[in-house]
């Protein structure tokens, strides 16, 4: 691989851990900054993770130091929830900082430090004119990621990502373990879930193939589902299938309002509901250069959801 030394921003989470493992398998040396060292202890077991560094990646001088000696940068930083901004603004400061200002800082730092390759994580549905703050900020972030002509950028837009320890199917399985029925907002919204290992393969393939430069890839699995179908699937595979009742829009927004204010962070927000007014499905053909056979959810989800259910039952 032409790019051996890789800086991965946002690499300590669910998707990042899989991408880093694939990079290590490709004999790359990986540097991972983190806000807290404890968030990255699982990565220290990988032999080619050279450094896990506590750093503020929103600081230009820090980015310059982190980029010393690197060949490429991968940015996976993203948030699902954020507060609205002042009246007349398209999204709030949290979305602006994570999704727009950071990629602009990162590609500017790449240009200053002679790093010519940048991979950027966006999201399916990203658009400056999207119905939600999340989608609008992701759309503006893509423009920021492409703002330095001398930096060769590739952008990925995954649908909802599934896999062991995901925050999607596991959440719905856990809720059905605790609740007698599921009152579901956005029950008819459509998704095209993509396996986390396929997302990781796409990132590594892009580093190997310069035909991916300047392109935007929509990453999605082989089948489209409604949210209702996915929730039922999570319940069935975990052994706790419950009745799923779709909620009218007015009640869904009221529910989301209360869920926004739960301790420990929201399970659902009104902005999430706005995102679900647009189907989260792939609209462009998959490029042959990625060389990926996309994994169906039925081939993977039953195994980890059943294992998680058994582990939970044993611990009870």
Image (spheres, rainbow, N blue to C red):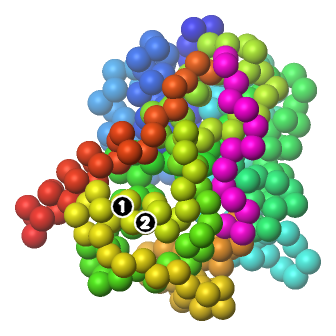
Q: CA distance from mark 2 to mark 1?
A: 5 Å
Asked if one can make out residue 225 in the rendered structure from this viewpoint, the answer is yes
* Magenta span dominant secondary structure: loop
Q: Are marks 2 and 1 in contact (CB under 8 Å)?
A: yes
Above or below for 123 versus 180: above
The answer to which of 126 and 191 lies nearer the viewer is 191
Instruction: Name the residue: 45% across, 24% down.
Output: 22
The answer to which of 229 and 308 lies nearer the viewer is 229
Instruction: Name the residue: 73% across, 53% down.
Output: 125
Residue 290 shown left or right of residue 47 in the figure: right
Residue 203 shown left or right of residue 112 in the figure: left
> Magenta residues, as a range?
276-289
Residue hosting label 2: 231
Residue hosting label 1: 234
Rendering coords of residue 42 (x, y %):
32, 40
Asked if one can make out residue 105 in the rendered structure from this viewpoint, the answer is no
Above or below for 108 versus 189: above
Q: How many marks?
A: 2
For the N terminus, which image quadrant? top right
């Amino acid at each position: 691989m032409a790019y051996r030394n890789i800086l991965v921003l946002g690499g300590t989470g669910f998707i990042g851990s899989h991408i880093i493992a694939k990079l290590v398998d490709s004999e790359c040396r990986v540097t991972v900054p983190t806000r807290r060292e404890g968030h990255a202890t699982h990565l220290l077991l990988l032999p080619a993770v050279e450094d896990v560094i506590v750093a503020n990646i929103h600081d230009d001088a820090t980015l310059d130091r982190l980029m010393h000696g690197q060949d490429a940068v991968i940015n996976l930083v993203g948030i699902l929830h954020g507060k609205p901004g002042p009246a007349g603004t398209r999204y709030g400061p949290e979305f602006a900082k994570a999704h727009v200002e950071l990629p602009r800082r990162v590609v500017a730092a790449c240009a200053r430090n002679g790093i010519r390759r940048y991979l950027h994580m966006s999201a399916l549905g990203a658009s400056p004119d999207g119905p939600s703050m999340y989608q609008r900020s992701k759309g503006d972030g893509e423009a920021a990621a492409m703002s330095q002509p001398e930096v060769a950028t590739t952008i990925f837009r995954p649908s909802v990502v599934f896999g062991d320890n995901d925050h999607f199917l596991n959440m719905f399985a856990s809720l059905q373990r605790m609740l007698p029925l599921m009152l579901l907002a956005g029950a008819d919204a459509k998704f095209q879930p993509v396996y986390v290992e396929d997302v990781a393969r796409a990132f590594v393939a892009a580093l190997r193939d310069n035909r991916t430069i300047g392109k935007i890839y929509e990453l999605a699995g082989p089948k489209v589902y409604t949210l209702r179908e996915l929730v039922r699937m999570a319940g069935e595979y975990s052994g706790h299938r419950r009745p799923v009742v779709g909620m009218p829009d007015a009640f869904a927004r009221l529910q989301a309002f209360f869920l926004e204010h739960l301790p420990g962070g929201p399970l659902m927000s009104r902005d999430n509901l706005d995102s679900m007014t647009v189907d989260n499905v792939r609209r462009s053909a998959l490029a042959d250069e990625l060389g990926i056979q996309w994994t169906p959810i039925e081939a993977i989800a039953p195994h980890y959801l059943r294992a998680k259910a058994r582990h939970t039952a044993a611990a009870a």
